[in-house]
Amino acid sequence: MNGIKFQIRCKQYYSASTRALIDMAISKLLLAAMVFISLLLVQLVEADKQVVNTHATESSYTPKLDCGAACEARCRLASRQKMCKRACGTCCARCNCVPPGTSGNQELCPCYYNMTTHGGRRKCP
């Protein structure tokens, strides 16, 4: 009912060309609103896909290494076993990797190999 009254008032106060301009402006505004809403929906769908993919990678389980047993094997020939096990345990906890053998092979675990002390020496035994 209000729409009819508006149209009647428009006919009374505005010329035909002015009414055409008003109709065109309204249609452009509606078109812009629809484009904005569709872009917003696309953005929301993409964000939801990213969240789902993030949860999928978190759930792909990489088994946690038993650092105690791995460092026990790595440090069994060390002269200072307590210090070796402590450093190895720190490196293992950060990298989830301990190279095989009692020494060397550090390049098999890049994170383990690249960890250094404040003095620039290799941290991991």
Image: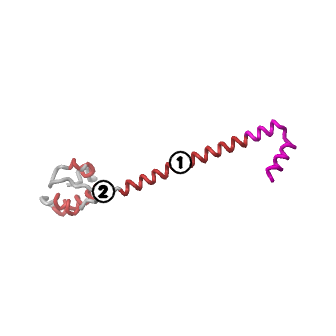
The residue shown at (80%, 40%) is 19
- 1 or 2: tag closer to the N-terminus: 1
The residue shown at (28%, 55%) is 95
Question: How far, Cα to Cα, is label 1 from label 2?
Answer: 31 Å
Q: Is residue 16 found inside the magenta-colored segment of the image?
A: yes
The residue carrying pointer 1 sits among few (fewer than 14), some (14 to 19) or many (20 or more) residues within 10 Å by Cα, namely few
By secondary structure, the bulk of the magenta-drawn segment is best described as helix
Horizontal relation, residue 105 to residue 31: left or right: left
Q: Mark on residue 95?
A: none
Residue designated by label 2? 62
The answer, for residue 34, to whether it is visible in the render is: yes
Q: Secondary structure at mark 1?
A: helix
Q: Which residue type does callout 1 highlight? A: Gln
Q: Which residue type does callout 2 highlight? A: Thr
Residue range (magenta)? 1-24
Q: Camera-side residue: 63 or 23?
A: 23
The residue carrying pointer 2 sits among few (fewer than 14), some (14 to 19) or many (20 or more) residues within 10 Å by Cα, namely few
Q: Is residue 57 found inside the magenta-colored segment of the image?
A: no
- Residue 87 placement: quadrant: bottom left
Q: Quadrant of the C terminus?
A: bottom left
The answer, for residue 121, to whether it is visible in the render is: no
Horizontal relation, residue 33 to residue 102: left or right: right
The residue shown at (28%, 60%) is 64
The residue shown at (65%, 46%) is 33
Q: Position of residue 96 (x, y in %)?
A: 27, 56
Mark 1 touches mark 2? (CB < 8 Å): no
Q: Camera-side residue: 114 or 2?
A: 2
Q: Position of residue 30 (x, y in %)?
A: 68, 44
Q: Secondary structure at mark 2?
A: loop
Q: Position of residue 62 (x, y in %)?
A: 30, 56
Q: Mark on residue 43?
A: 1
Horizontal relation, residue 1 to residue 90: left or right: right
